[in-house]
Image (cartoon, rainbow, N blue to C red):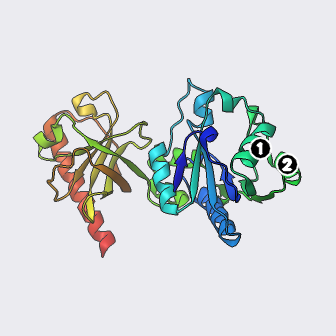
Amino acid sequence: MYFLRDYQNYRTQTSGCVATIGNFDGIHLGHQHMINEVKNTAKRNSLPSVIITFEPLPKEFLQTDNMLDRLLTLKEKLSILKRINVDTILCLRFNNELANMSSEDFIKEILVKKINAKHLIVGDDFHFGKNRTGNTQLLHDASKIYDFKLTQISTYEIDDDRVSSSRIRKLLKDGDIINAQKLLGRHYEMSGNVIYGDNLGTKLGFPTANIKRSRPAILKGVFVVAIKGLDNDLYGVTNVGKRPTVDGIENRVETHIFDFNKNIYGAHIRIIFLKKIRNEVRFDSVEQLKEQIEKDILTAKEYLKKISE
């Protein structure tokens, strides 16, 4: 996998490529359908597959007063794309230059001159360029001028509704991780490096691995989770929230790993969300919180036993 943030430094593909473009926040089933089409087309034509995405996301750059609730950080997105096995990821640094680039120049400078696209695959609602003036009709006209093929992929639907990042965001905010997973095609996950906390979990008898994230978490509550990146088959409970019982002010992702006592500070781990246990609530005392954590652990272990049978 090749990754580059700035298209000016991207070495032109002399042999050509098969490409697609998008934010790919979540890399849900609709995105996966598109990416698989790119990979299959590239394989049939003995060309590399190229995924073009953006950082920050265009909406984040253009609407600075309204931070988008991302499903994935950039690092998480790249990790999943790596597991999907695309050949090249070109992550365009979305800045004033790119925001003001006309759709015609985007085609000529990036799609033609830089990546030398021989086949472009996009969704039927795809828009690009300054003020989103570029569309599939413009790409169709350009394909005749610059001699590349264009394939439009129809909207991917589940339960007669479009699979979209915004639909998944709403499900996760509502705590419906089961239906969110259905649209993602996998369990929802978050990742980060394990950092030092305030040792409250240790004091209560339930030490936690706290992960550092570059973006706020969408989920809130207590969950049964699997932990990847350490030993095999690790499970636990994760609390995502502000910890109101101890007057917390910042959102945290804290995981108590079952039957595990190694020092993992600095390790990069993935938290795989399996089931929501409950909402985060404020208890009248730390002792009540401790009693609830014991119940949460018992609930989680009963669930894990059930799904393993």
Mark 1: few, some, or many residues within 10 Å (few <14, many ≥20)?
A: many
Which residue is depicted at the point 61% across and 30% down?
95
> Viewed as shown, does residue 307 lie left or right of 42?
left
Q: Residue 35 in the image: state x and y as whole percent.
A: 62, 60
Which residue is depicted at the point 33% across and 70% down?
307
Residue type beneath disc 2:
Ala
Tell me the distance, in whole angstroms, between the alpha carbons under discs 1 and 2. 8 Å
Q: Residue 196 in the image: state x and y as whole percent.
A: 21, 37
Residue 18 in sight in this render: yes
Q: Are marks 1 and 2 in contact (CB under 8 Å)?
A: yes
Compared to 109, does 117 lie above or below? below
Q: Residue 89 in the image: state x and y as whole percent.
A: 57, 51
Q: Which residue is mark 1?
A: 107
> Viewed as shown, does residue 252 lie left or right of 215?
left
Q: Which residue is mark 2?
A: 142
Compared to 187, does 175 lie above or below? above
Say whether disc 1 or disc 2 marks the residue closer to the N-terminus: 1
Choose top left, top right, bottom left or bottom right for residue 65.
top right
Choose top left, top right, bottom left or bottom right for residue 60.
top right
